[in-house]
Amino acid sequence: MNIDYLCEFVTLAETNNFQEAADKLFISQSSLSKHIKAMEKKLEVPLFDRTTRSVKLSNYGRLFLPYAHKIVQLQREYTNVINRRIKKSKDSITIASTSQMFQYSIVEILAQYKQQYFSAVVDTVIQPHKNLKNLLRQHKADFIFTGEPPNEACESDFERILFHSEPLVALLPKNHPLSVSDTICIDNFRDVQLIIQDESSIEYEVFISLCESYGFEPNILTIPIGNALVDFVKKGIGIAIMLEIPAKNVFHPDVSLKVIEPRTVIDVNLLYLKSTKLSPAAKVFLQCVKSFEHK
């Protein structure tokens, strides 16, 4: 049975007048009469007793009215819930990244975005590097900020906006023998204690691959907190392998920063799925990223 007809039935039961009910429903009196007759035909009982001057609920109509009220109320409730969800999906975005990606002006972009789209709700998700692209594929995030080595940038299911390109660098004590050169060849790390933030980071993945291409397995100590790397270096525990910008952010006068050779560049990209239709909120965010990119 057409739920709209149920709404019309309830309104007519409240007014007991076809013209008044039709005016409230913004339909013609003839349409209302036609719809009520269709309901009566479906139920095979009269819902109203009609005279030339009045209309009132029949015994069957009074029996049916409480159920019609419940159905109409449920319709209003689920319609409101769906409409709120649609509005939320249009006015919200989810951005995922690793913790260290927030060193790449992401906060500034979010501030600019909120100025332009004040009503938007922004959810940020921190995940290991290896999980980020799956969040996009599973539609659990609208955008991700992630580091990518050159061989990953060929994945065709993503749109990319390049944010930064930077090399792998080494942080080492100033008195370390390797600190005298401007760069450090990867081959010099064969028998050296190395420190990297954690195994899920992009620099870990790229550095391991680079060492393997030179035929050795590096001796790596992983720690979960990136800011602590420089403390390990200052105490002479090892050489830290980092991306350039995070390394500069924790730089200390007692350490040296050296580019690793062969120079291995990692792109910091904003990614989103090509196949996903962007919401209005997501489109505004994308414009903010692009405008920030050209500043």
Image (tube, rainbow, N blue to C red):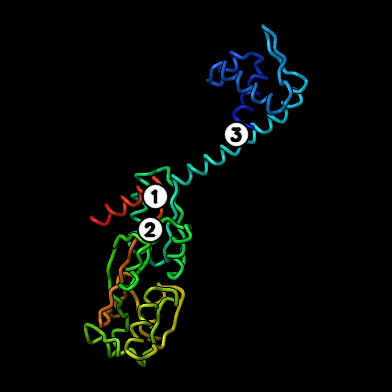
Residue corresponding to mark 2: 272
State which quadrant residue 207 falls in. Answer: bottom left
- Label 1 environment density (alpha carbons within 10 Å; few <14, some 14–19, many ≥20): some
3D distance between C-alphas at marks 1 and 3 = 28 Å
Q: Position of residue 111 (x, y in %)?
A: 36, 51
Circle 2/circle 1 CB separation < 8 Å: yes
Q: Which residue is mark 3?
A: 76
Give above or below for 120 relative to 149.
above
Q: Amino acid at mark 3?
A: Arg
Q: Bin the neighbour count of mark 3 within 10 Å (Cα to Cα): few under 14, some 14-19, many 20 and up.
A: few
The amino acid marked with disc number 2 is Tyr
Residue at position x 38%, y 73% from top?
Answer: 202
What percent of the width, then of the height, locates residue 239? 35, 84
Q: CA distance from mark 2 to mark 3?
A: 35 Å
Marks 2 & 3, CB-CB < 8 Å contact: no
Earlier in the chain: of badge 2 and badge 3, it is 3
